Image (cartoon, grey):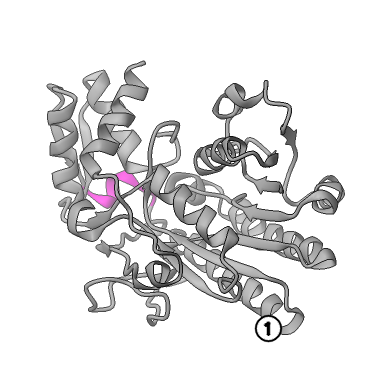
Amino acid sequence: MKVLITGGAGFIGSHLAERLLKDGHEVFVFDDLSTGDLDNVHHLEGNPKFHMKVGSVLDRDALEPLFAEADLVYHLAAAVGVNYVIENPLQSLTTNIRGTEIVLELANRKKTRVLIASTSEVAGKKNGKVMFSEDDDRLLGPTTVTRWNYSTSKAVDEMLGLAYWREKKLPVVIVRFFNVIGPRQSPNYGMVVPRFIKQALLGHPITVYNDGEQKRCFTDIEDAVDGLLALGEHPEAPGEIFNLGGDADTNEISIKSLAGKIKNLTESDSPVEYVPYEKAFAKGSYEDLNYRVPDLTKINSFTGYEPSVSLDMTLRKIIEYYES
């Protein structure tokens, strides 16, 4: 197939492009490099089936010829990362919502299947359940807190996608990522694992926000790509939302414990420092989610998806990447 990846020079997009090329597909990457990086795809440039174009997802004219060719679209272009969203609230909302509108409008011309990247943050705060499922009620903080811009914008993306499916029968699949990690993920936008690893390797304090009791379930990038490819092909996936994450039994961990684990794996002398939210972020910009773990029943029942890479194995891969 000819596959278009918006945001394809980013962390997830570059790994997806790599796998699609390995499987024999022709890949078109489109990225404005706001959070993506040409270094992420530099090793793919010698492949005649790889094509890279720099541009904004808000530029309809630049995207239009790529959609005319594409058999499948992975829409990963978005404002991502806590720090980036807090520092660029207006740009984040515009990119995430208007960008998705343009992608859906162009895909609808040929009824090209689109997978929209969403986020576990759509679910919001813990609602009393052990794990989040796709149809749980959502509980968000106030609109005065900038952090919720990202969750809200991605929820609008989901609703747009479902509306196109219901009204126009555009085959849209929505994928909610749960803390995907791996080599090539940047520490510059607030992602906790590369930030901790970089701090540990440099001997800087490993900074944990608040008390570190927030719990997450991390997903290895190779497992995430497995899920994306399976959903890209599944005939019953359009019109559905899927959690895509790691195994809760092996990969759930508190941020406090994560800092300790990384300190041990890197054999670092870095101290672990606890930083109150009010010192780490501007007033009125941040509110945390204390628990974010996925229920993977749905994606498993559709595709047989079962994440297989342990957290320790993923952390070792990332450490080796940064050491190199």
Taking the spot 59% from the left edge, 76% from the top edge, the residue there is: 239
Residue 12 appears in view: yes
Taking the spot 56% from the left edge, 50% from the top edge, the residue there is: 79
* Front in this rendered view, residue 274 or 124: 124
Query: Looking at the picture, does residue 203 appear above or below residue 315?
Result: above
Residue 273 appears in view: no
Taking the spot 25% from the left edge, 21% from the top edge, the residue there is: 201
Left or right of 253, for residue 220 = right
* Front in this rendered view, residue 52 or 201: 52
Q: Amino acid at mark 1?
A: Arg
Residue 82 at x, y percent in the picture: 43, 49
Q: Which residues are magenta?
A: 276-282
Residue 252 at x, y percent in the picture: 21, 55
Q: Which residue is mark 1?
A: 166
* Front in this rendered view, residue 75 or 17: 17
Residue 299 at x, y percent in the picture: 42, 67
Quarter of the figure with residue 233? bottom right
Residue 290 at x, y percent in the picture: 25, 62
